[in-house]
């Protein structure tokens, strides 16, 4: 509870507990003077101690340095991924996009190609000026 919200009688009792010499109700001109005197008599409030962070030494590599050194390492050559395989199948077969996606997922471990992703590759190829063969209706296509 804040001192300003306490009644004068309670403040006077608090003062008399803290002070060496007791004061009466007429010892202070105002309640504000009584509160100021109590604050002077109270021991200083010690803030809770913050946990100290260990200091870094210059010899210790930082996370940024580790990431930078990892990116500087030579990259492994990548094989034909989902995108490359999708482009090949789009150009060489008349399979619908969902059949191409199923074939890619069967051929490449961990691939999650979808009809939409294969369609995206076809759209990108068209935008790049590649002539993409039309797709056959799904009923007429043998997916083998």
Image (tube, rainbow, N blue to C red):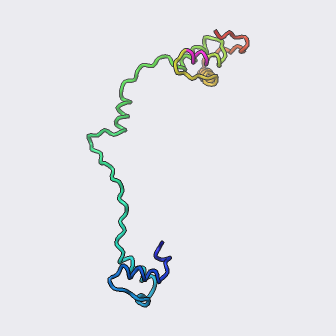
Q: Is residue 102 magenta?
A: yes
State the image coordinates of residue 26 (x, y, percent, origin top left). Answer: 43, 90
State the image coordinates of residue 116 (x, y, percent, origin top left). Answer: 63, 25
Tell me if I can see residue 123 in this picture: no
Residue 84, relative to residue 64: is it above or below? above
48 to the left or right of 119? left
21 to the left or right of 31? left
Residue at 35% x, 65% y: name it.
Answer: 46
Residue at 73% x, 13% y: name it.
Answer: 139
Q: Is residue 3 magenta?
A: no
Tell me if I can see residue 81 in this picture: yes
Quarter-of-image position of residue 94: top right
Q: 48 or 112, which is in the foreground?
A: 48
Quarter-of-image position of residue 111: top right
What is the chief secondary structure element of the magenta stretch? helix
129 to the left or right of 67? right
State the image coordinates of residue 91 (x, y, percent, origin top left). Answer: 60, 13
Exactly how many numbered labels are in the figure? 0
Quarter-of-image position of residue 39: bottom left
Residue 129, relative to residue 143: is it above or below? below
Residue at 64% x, 16% y: name it.
Answer: 99
Residue 42, relative to residue 119: is it above or below? below
State the image coordinates of residue 73 (x, y, percent, origin top left). Answer: 36, 26
Give the extent of the magenta segment.
Answer: 101-106
Q: 107 or 83, which is in the foreground?
A: 107
Q: Quadrant of the C terminus?
A: top right
């Amino acid at each position: 509870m804040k001192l300003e919200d306490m009644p004068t009688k309670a403040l006077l009792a608090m003062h008399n507990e803290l002070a060496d010499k007791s004061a009466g109700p007429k010892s202070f001109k105002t309640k504000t003077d009584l509160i100021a005197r109590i604050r002077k008599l109270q021991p200083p409030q010690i803030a809770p101690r913050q946990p100290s962070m260990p200091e870094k030494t210059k010899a210790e590599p930082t996370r940024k340095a580790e990431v930078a050194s990892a990116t500087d390492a030579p990259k492994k050559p990548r094989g034909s991924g989902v995108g490359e395989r999708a482009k090949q199948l789009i150009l060489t077969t008349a399979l619908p996009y969902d059949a191409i996606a199923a074939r890619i997922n069967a051929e490449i471990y961990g691939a999650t190609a979808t009809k939409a992703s294969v369609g995206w590759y076809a759209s990108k190829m068209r935008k790049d000026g590649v002539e993409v063969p039309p797709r056959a209706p799904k009923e007429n296509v043998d997916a083998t």
